[in-house]
């Protein structure tokens, strides 16, 4: 049905289809439909910055994963994400499992970059192993199981997309299998401590995936704008600003779906209990008329106040500190250790990934350019000085 609705031109349905879409054009269409519109999918959709912030903070609008989904939904069957009450959510904020040490990430990332030689895949060879390895130390995963833990984290990353776009059967089975293994492993490590278990699942399923997306999206923007990459290499202290700019410009989670617990009014529209309300994060981050809404990527003007990313309860705000800590460290080390890194081909995104648009293949090389390549490079980017 999502596919059919997309053929009718509904911008939200086209986003859900997640194949060959011009997201910037769709964002503009969502803006034109007003602060809140009813999609043919029956979801209420907003790309308004102010209304989006209200929706994400409204206790009457709760996450649809997994409690608000149908009994047959894959995420209900594999319980990828904990269904948290307000009390449980607030209690988890103080869990040490959600506060990653920058030193751990730096050590693991430094070791991974030390093994790099020539061409490699940024996502598969660096980002996901480093971030999953950091999470395994944070959760005290036994060393003999850390490689398999990393593999399960990668396979479980599709849970965020499966909430809104049904995976193919084979992919659903991979997801369910990975989540089952993670639940077993995290359960053994956590023991009877339910909060520790919930925090461990959040880190494994959400934290690793979101952090990998942030760094991949950031590197894509930076390498496609050599002047921006040069700024970061010259001043690695801009890594924090680069992360915030990425969260605004190319958010790691683009759609946040909520269910109405009761009848309510939003932007003058009557929203019935049980209705779905979706915040289009990238549309809200670029809402017309607001400061920098149409600007390109620029690390020199970044601010956490410029976007709604990582602000949605009950999962994203809990992993936000971990995501920010890990991504800043990895981005800073990439700029310090591999200033000559460049893309060698097109990136590949995960299929049926309307929520994360996750990059699963990112071919690069860290080798210095030949003279001929440098000439071509400078001709293609005349703003570059060297």
Image (spheres, helix red, strand yellow):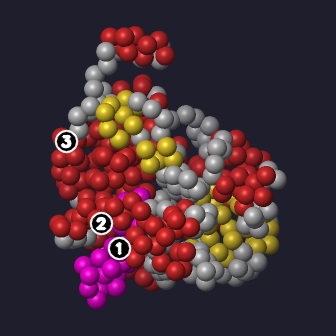
How far across and how far down the image is residue 146, in percent? 24, 64
What residue would you read off at disc 1? Answer: 182
Residue 92 lies in magenta, yes or no? no
Question: Position of 163 compared to 30: left or right?
Answer: left
Query: Which comes before the other along the chain, label 1 or label 3?
Result: 3
Helix, strand or loop for disc 2: helix
Circle 3 residue: 115
Q: Residues within 10 Å of mark 2 (few under 14, many from 20)?
A: many
Helix, strand, or loop for circle 1?
helix
Number of dots carrying numbers: 3
Judge by depth and name the residue closer to the eye, 270 or 193. Answer: 193
Residue 332, position as x, y percentages in the image: 29, 41
Circle 3 sits in a helix, a strand or a loop, which is it?
A: loop
Residue at the (77%, 61%) spot, across then down? 39
Q: Is residue 318 left or right of residue 331?
A: right
Residue displayed at 22% across by 41% down? 113
* Residue 48 on image: x %, y %: 67, 54
The magenta segment: 181-209
Q: Name, please, the residue furthest toward the right.
A: 8
Q: Residue 207 magenta-drawn?
A: yes
Query: Which residue carries the number 2 mark?
Result: 149
């Amino acid at each position: 049905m999502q596919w059919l609705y997309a053929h009718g031109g509904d911008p939200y349905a086209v986003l859900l289809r997640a194949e060959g879409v011009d997201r910037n054009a769709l964002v503009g269409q969502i803006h034109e439909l007003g602060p809140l519109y009813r999609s043919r999918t029956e979801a209420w959709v907003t790309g308004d910055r102010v209304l989006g912030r209200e929706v994400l903070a409204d206790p009457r609008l709760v996450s649809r994963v997994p409690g608000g989904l149908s009994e047959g939904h894959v995420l209900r069957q594999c319980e990828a994400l904990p269904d948290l009450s307000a009390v449980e959510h607030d209690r988890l904020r103080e869990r040490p499992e959600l506060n990653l040490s920058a030193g751990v990430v730096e050590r693991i990332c430094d070791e991974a970059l030390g093994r790099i030689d020539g061409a490699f895949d940024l996502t598969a060879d660096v980002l996901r192993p480093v971030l999953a390895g950091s999470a395994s130390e944070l959760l005290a995963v036994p060393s003999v199981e850390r490689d398999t833990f990393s593999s399960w984290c990668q396979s479980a990353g599709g849970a965020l997309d499966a909430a809104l776009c049904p995976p193919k059967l084979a992919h659903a089975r991979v997801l369910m299998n990975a989540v089952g293994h993670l639940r077993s492993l995290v359960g053994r490590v956590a023991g009877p401590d339910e909060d520790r278990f919930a925090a461990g699942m959040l880190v494994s399923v959400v934290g690793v995936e979101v952090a990998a997306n942030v760094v991949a999206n950031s590197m894509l923007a930076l390498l496609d704008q050599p002047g921006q990459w040069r700024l970061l290499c010259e001043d690695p202290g801009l890594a924090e600003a680069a992360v915030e700019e990425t969260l605004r410009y190319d958010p790691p989670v683009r759609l946040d779906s909520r269910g109405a617990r009761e009848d309510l009014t939003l932007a003058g529209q009557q929203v019935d209990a049980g209705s779905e309300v979706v915040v289009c994060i990238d549309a809200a981050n670029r809402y017309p008329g607001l400061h920098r809404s149409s600007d390109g990527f620029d690390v020199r003007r970044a601010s956490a106040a410029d976007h709604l990313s990582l602000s949605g309860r009950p999962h994203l705000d809990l992993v936000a500190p971990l995501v920010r800590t890990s991504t800043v460290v990895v981005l800073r080390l990439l700029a310090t250790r591999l200033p000559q890194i460049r893309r060698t081909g097109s990136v590949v995104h995960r299929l049926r990934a309307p929520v994360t648009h996750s990059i699963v293949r990112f071919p690069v090389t860290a080798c210095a350019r030949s003279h001929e390549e440098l000439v071509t490079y400078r001709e293609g980017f005349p703003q570059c000085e060297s």
